[in-house]
Image: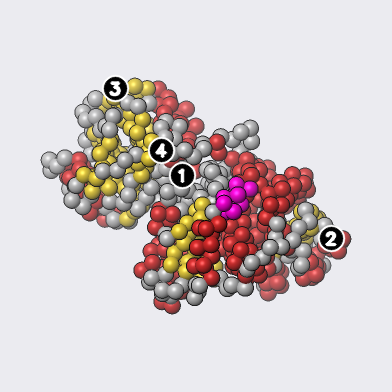
Amino acid sequence: MCGIFGIVTKDEEPLGQILIDAAKRLTYRGYDSVGAATISGGTIDLRKDTGKVEEVAEKYKFAEMVGQRGITQLRWATFGTPSQVNAQPHLDSDGDMVGAHNGNVVNNIELRQQFIAEGMTVRSENDGESCVHAVERYIDQGMDFISAIQHAYHDLEGDYAFVIGKVNDSKLYAIKKGSGLVVGIGKDFTCLSSDLPSILPLTRDIIRLEDGEIVTLWADKVELHSVNDGSLIERAPERITESMASVQKDGYPHFMLKEIHEQPQVAQELLHRMKGDQEEIDQILETIKNARNLFLVGCGTSYHACLAGAVYFSQLAGKAAIPVLAPQFEPQYLNAVGTGDVGIFVSQSGETKDVLNALQASQSKGMTCLSMANVIGSTLTQKTEAWLPLVCGYEISVPATKTFTNQVITFMYLAAQLGGNTDLDFDTLPDLMAETIESVDPAVKSLVPKINPWENSYILGYGLTYPMALEGALKLKEITYAHCEGMLSTEFKHGPLSAVTEGFPIIFAAGPEDVPLIISGINEVTCRGGEAIAVGQANPALAANANDMVTIPKSNPIFASLLSVLPLQLLSYHMAVARGYDPDFPRNLSKTLTVD
Ligand code: M6R
C-alpha cells in the first residue's frame, strides 16, 4: 500500500516526466491520490491532489516541474480521507522540508497532538505528515539528518518507509522499517522507491535496504547507516536482469486481460523451472513429507490457492494439509504448534503484513517455514528457509490472475511429486489453459448482459472446484463492485437458497467427477426460478439441466479444476468493463497490503 519514489540529480533539471513515469509504475500500490515535489536550491514546488496519476499530473502540470531532487507518492488511504490536504508529499512547519511515506504509523493520532502542542504546523490527518514532523522535531534541535531520523525512528510506531529532503541541501534521506525500500544507482543520479518497477527503467544497479537502515542519496553515491548506532553499512549494488516486459500492456486494453492471456506462458515457464530444480524440489518435498502438521497460509486470492493446495495434497499424495487465512493462524493454531510443524506461506507480493505476522509467530514457535511468492527479494522470500518463485514476471493489475494459477500449479506439482503420481502430464497443461481462454470467451461474453443487471450472485463449487468458486467470486466482487459469494455447492440449500428469485444468477463450477451432485444443486435452484450457469466439461446431462453452459476442454479432474477458474476470471473482467470500471485499479484497493 502506497508507493514512494525519490530521485537526486547533479544539477537542476526537468524531473516532472521522470516523476510521472515512476508514479505510473507504482499505481498498483495505491491510487487514492498522487503528489509530486521538486526541490531546487531554496525552493520546494509541491503539487498534489486526489485522482489517478494521469489526471492529477495533467491538471497540475507535473511535466513542467524542475529540480535537483524530486519525490512522488501514490496513496492508499489509511489515516485521513483521500483528499488534497491528506495527499502526499507533505511539508514541515516552515515549508523548507518535504517528505512522503508508505506504510502505517500507528501512533499517528498521538503524535499529531504532540506536534501541535509543540507549536508545529500540522496541516493534515495523514501519517506521512507525522514522519516529516518527527524529523523536523530533531532538526530544529540542531541535529543532522542521520541523528534526527534515528530519533524520529523511536517516535514513529508501526511499519513504514519514508523519504525526506530539505532546501539548501543536495541530498535525500530515507529509512526502511517494515515496508519495502530499494535504492537505484545510475549515471549522475540516484533514486529510491518502494518497489523495482519505477527504478528499473532508469537503472538496473540496485541496493535493497533492510529494516533499520537509513540511506543518504547524493547524485553520485549513496551511504547506508544503521538506525541503532549510526554506524556505516557496506553493501555492494546488485545488478537486476529480470525482464520489464510485463510492465507494458502490449496492445491489450487492460493489464488484467493481458495477464489472463499470459497464464499459459507463465505456467510453462514455471513448470520448466520446477523440473529443472529437482534437487531443491526434493528437499522441499522431504520437509513436507515429514511435517507433523502442514499449514498452507495466505490471504485473499493466495488463500484460495492454499485451499486448492490442500485438496491436491490429499487427493494426490494422501497428505493432510491445513489451509488457513493468515490472520487466523495465531488465534486458531499458534498455541498448538511447534518444531516438527511446517508452514508454506503463499503471497504474490511477499509483503502482505497479515502473512508476515503469521510467519513471525510461526517462527517464534520453531516451525519450519517455506514460502511461495512472485516478487523476487520480497520480505517473505528473505525470511523463510526456502522459497518457491512463481515466475510470473510483474503482475500489475490489482486483481491477481496469473499469480493465482501459478500458485495452484505449484501446489499441484508438489502434491503429484509427493504422491509419486505419474498420470498427470503437466506438459499438456499450458496448451489446455490456452485452449480454454480462447474457446470460452464468446460464451462468457454472452453471459454478461444476463448477470450484470444483478447486484448479487453466487458461484458454487464442490471438492476440487470449491476453491475456484471462491476465487471466481472474489474476482467478481473486487472489480465489478457487485456482491458475489463463493460457496460449497452443497451448502447452498442450508440457507442461501432463500435468496433465489426469478432469474437470480448462480454459477456452478462442475468438476467432471461431481456432475451428478452439481445437477442436484442446479435443479434445486432452477425449480425456484433461479438461472443456473454451468462451467464444466462437455456433458449432455449438465447442459440439459443448466440454463447456460460454458464448456471447458476435456482433461483429468485435477487439471479441470484449474481450467474452471479461467472463465470466471474472464467473466469478472468483461462485467467490470461493461459496467464502465477499470478492472486494473478497483476503487479502495491496493495490490500490496503492508498494513494490519
Ligand atoms: O500479495 P498477496 O498475494 O499476499 O496478496 C493477498 C491479497 O491481498 C490478494 O490476493 C488480493 O486478494 C487480490 N487483489 C485479489 O485479486
Does residue 452 appear left or right of residue 545 in this picture?
Answer: left
The residue wearing badge 3 is 11
CA distance for labels 4 and 3: 26 Å
Residue at numbered disc 4: 239
Nearer-N-terminus badge (4/2): 4
Q: Which residue is mark 2?
A: 539
User: Mark 4 vs mark 3: which is more N-terminal?
Assistant: 3
Which callout, 2 or 1, points to the residue nearer the camera? 2
Alpha carbon separation for disc pair 2 and 1: 44 Å
**Location of residue 423 (image quadrant):** bottom right
Q: Is residue 273 magenta?
A: yes
Check disc 1: other Cα within 10 Å, few if <14, some if 14-19, many if 20+.
many
Residues at marks 4 and 1 touching, judged by CB atoms closer than 8 Å? no
Span shown in magenta: 268-276
Under mark 2, the amino acid is Asn
Q: Is residue 1 magenta?
A: no
Secondary element under disc 3, as helix, strand or loop, is strand
Residue carrying label 1: 30
